[in-house]
Image (spheres, rainbow, N blue to C red):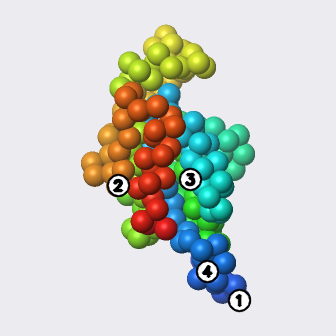
Amino acid sequence: MERRKVKNLKTHSYKIKRIDFEKRNKHRGIAIWLVGLSGSGKSTLANGLHAKLFENGLQSVVLDGDNTRLGINKDLGFSDEDRNENIRRVAEISKLFIETGHIVINAFISPFEINRIEAKKIISDKDFVEVYINSSITTCENRDVKGLYKKARSGEIKDFTGVSSPFEKPINPDISIDTENLSIEESIDYVFHELKSKL
């Protein structure tokens, strides 16, 4: 997908700055990047963490893979190039939310290390928290209520991560969660506890 680059643009500066939002919110804006296979528990954890942050008076927003692909990224498929663009766009959106002092919970498979590095570069090292949702492909298949793995194995779905397209495990995530041995409540509490020092 070829995209024309526009050169005659400039960044606008606004009266209300990030520091003003963060002072009002009483916490920093950061991106929490949940990485894992389909069925590992990313969306469930994102939803629970979002509720936990809300209950504690913290401003957060969730960007979820399915939801963004039904909206801003509905023009993208699942080729390597489109996956790259998918992650680039959501990283840019995350950055905008961070500038308004939000905690942005990103729930995306993010299968390639190079994409996660690029997302971190767009957002910035200090504002990026990578959380690896560690679950075996067998467990993910057993949890698969949509039947996606079955369709992928039969060839009905092409380029499916973990089956016909690779998943590169995070090399050095900030937080790692074993969702095979922790309940969803334990996982939410653990991530919340680990995040508190970063806010």
Choose between 68 and 180: the one closer to the eye. Answer: 180
Label 2, residues with CA under 10 Å away: few <14, some 14-19, many ≥20: some
> What residue did someone put label 3 on?
105
User: Residue at coordinates 38% horizontally, 18% vertically from top-left?
Assistant: 138
Q: Between disc 2 and disc 4, whose residue precedes?
A: 4
Question: SS class of the residue under badge 4?
Answer: helix
Any part of residue 76 in sight? no
The CA distance from mark 2 to mark 1 is 33 Å
In primary-sequence order, the first of circles 4 and 3 is 4
Q: Nearer the viewer, mark 2 or mark 1?
A: 2
Marks 4 and 3 in Cβ contact (< 8 Å): no
Spatial separation of the CA atoms under disc 4 and disc 3: 20 Å
**In the displayed structure, does residue 56 sit left or right of residue 152?**
right
Mark 4 lies on residue:
23
Under circle 1, the secondary element is loop
Q: Are marks 1 and 4 in contact (CB under 8 Å)?
A: no
Task: Give the mark count.
Answer: 4
Q: Are marks 2 and 4 in contact (CB under 8 Å)?
A: no
Give the x, y percent position of residue 59: 65, 63
Nearer the observer, disc 1 or disc 3? Answer: 3
Answer left or right for 173 relative to 111: left
Residue type for callout 3: Ile
The residue under label 2 is: 174
Q: For the residue labelled by badge 3, is the local secondary structure a helix, a strand or a loop?
A: strand
Q: Amino acid at mark 2?
A: Asp
Q: Nearer the viewer, residue 40 or 59?
A: 59
User: Label 2, label 3: how many angstroms apart (C-alpha)?
Assistant: 14 Å
Q: Going from the N terminus, do you reach mark 2 or mark 3 first? A: 3
Q: Which mark is residue 15?
A: 1
Q: Nearer the viewer, residue 180 or 144?
A: 180
Name the amino acid, label 4: Lys
